[in-house]
Amino acid sequence: MKSNFKKSTSENYKEFEIKQDETDTKPLTKDEFENYILDSGAKGSFMIYRSDKKDEELGVDEL
Amino acid sequence: MNNLTNNEQTESQASAENIFQKIHYESYDDWIANFALNLSYIWKENSAKEIKNIFNQKNDKSSAIIIGRGPSIKKHKHLEMLAESNYDGSILICDGALINTLKAGVTPDKFKKFFVVSIEPYDRITKFYDDPIVDKYGDKIHAIFPTIASNSTVARARLAGMKIFWLHLLFDYNQGKKSFNYISSLMVRAKNHLNGLPAIQTGANVGTSCWFIAWKVFGISNVGLIGINHGWEEDDPIEKILSHGFENKSNSLDMTNQNIKKYTKKIFNSDFNSYCILDPIFEFYSNSFKEFIKRSPDWVNTINATEGGSIFGDRISSMKFSDFLENYS
């Protein structure tokens, strides 16, 4: 399926005819994703917590 | 959205989690220093769980609105609608949205259950508290901070007169008694907080953290979202999309069609009949948030009133914000 991000009324997209063939979309490699985060400066926010105790992943009432 | 198998999507998400963890852990020493500087204040100030007692939040009709700074908030004038409403539930504001929220007339003078939430343990978020309008209303704002928050950020909020409420961020509790989560909890309990503090899953961003606080800490049943797009609008500038909102002015990504194709995805939100564009970080946030919504207890009702964005699917109700205000005011 072809999709087109371009809006004809948007100045922002005059230079960027964005077309995406969704059938060939591949996940970014680890290096690509890490570089993207660093390049975008989006070091903010935080990390996701994982545990073998799955209920604990939703939070702990009193720690 | 694409033809990845479920396994490929799971692996991709897990890989993103590991990368986020690796990047954040580079600041681990700073978190410990932050905690050390905060500890004497934590002992004197409040636990976030006390908010539940102050406002007697828990009942089936209780509601909260989470306010983010996604592009829909301006597009649909949601802050203006809220300012003119008689909503009497809790309002949890992502720190980055605080100043605009106050400027739009959503203030603690009118809305008594008024909270701002920060989770980032970095100095850079101090700017979200550094504005005359924050000082104007500060003494009526309840600020929720993690025990590893930057001391200077909390100091700025305190200077504005805010009442500080503390909680832990879960990050290494799975490592047991050697974990900093465990050790720091013992240090907090050593004085005044004998039962400790709530510890939350952040979902990697402050919007998802607000959602966790609303139901897990406050016990609120109906949690509405505005400005929580976890994605971009179609007419947002491509430079903004590829730089995740101009976070870094020195962004080095080439604005070529090839890169745009590599780094963005367009999805259709069938609940609102709208499109949304994901950068890799928003895709990560969105997938995580939807996972936790799906896993939340049955009594939690998550309502996307953002009127767009990427948060839709299992266990998520969608409605216009005007309808949310009508149903939950």
Image: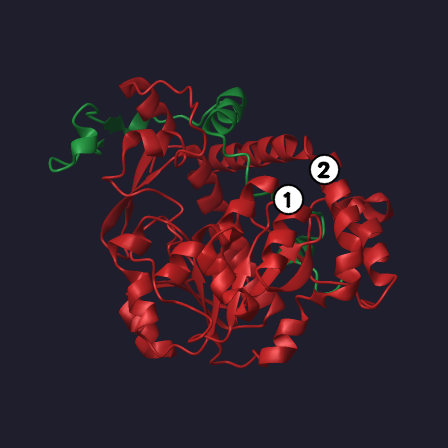
Chain colours: A green, B red
For mark 2, give the secondary structure.
helix
The location of residue A4, given as percent across then percent down, is 20, 32
Badge 2 crowding class, 10 Å Cα cut-off, few under 14, some 14 to 19, many 20 or more, is some
Residue B69 is tagged as none
What residue is shown with label 1? B121
Residue B233 visible, this angle: yes
Instruction: Estimate the x, y position of residue B66 in percent, counting from the top left.
Output: 45, 62
Q: Quadrant of residue B282?
A: top left
Q: Label 1's element?
A: loop
Q: Residue at x 31, y 62 (%)?
A: B78
The local crowd at label 1, few if under 14, some if 14 to 19, many if 20 or more residues have their Cα within 10 Å, is: many
Give the residue type at disc 1. Pro
The quarter of the displayed image where residue B280 is located:
top left
- Residue that sits furthest to the left in the current view: A8
Give the spatial CA distance, label 2 vs label 1: 8 Å
Question: In which image quadrant can residue B264 be found?
Answer: top left
Quadrant showing the N terminus of chain B: top left
Q: Is residue B56 above or below residue B33?
A: below
Q: Give the residue number, with chain letter if any, for mark 2.
A: B30
User: Are the residues at dot 2 and dot 1 in contact (C-beta closer than 8 Å)?
Assistant: yes
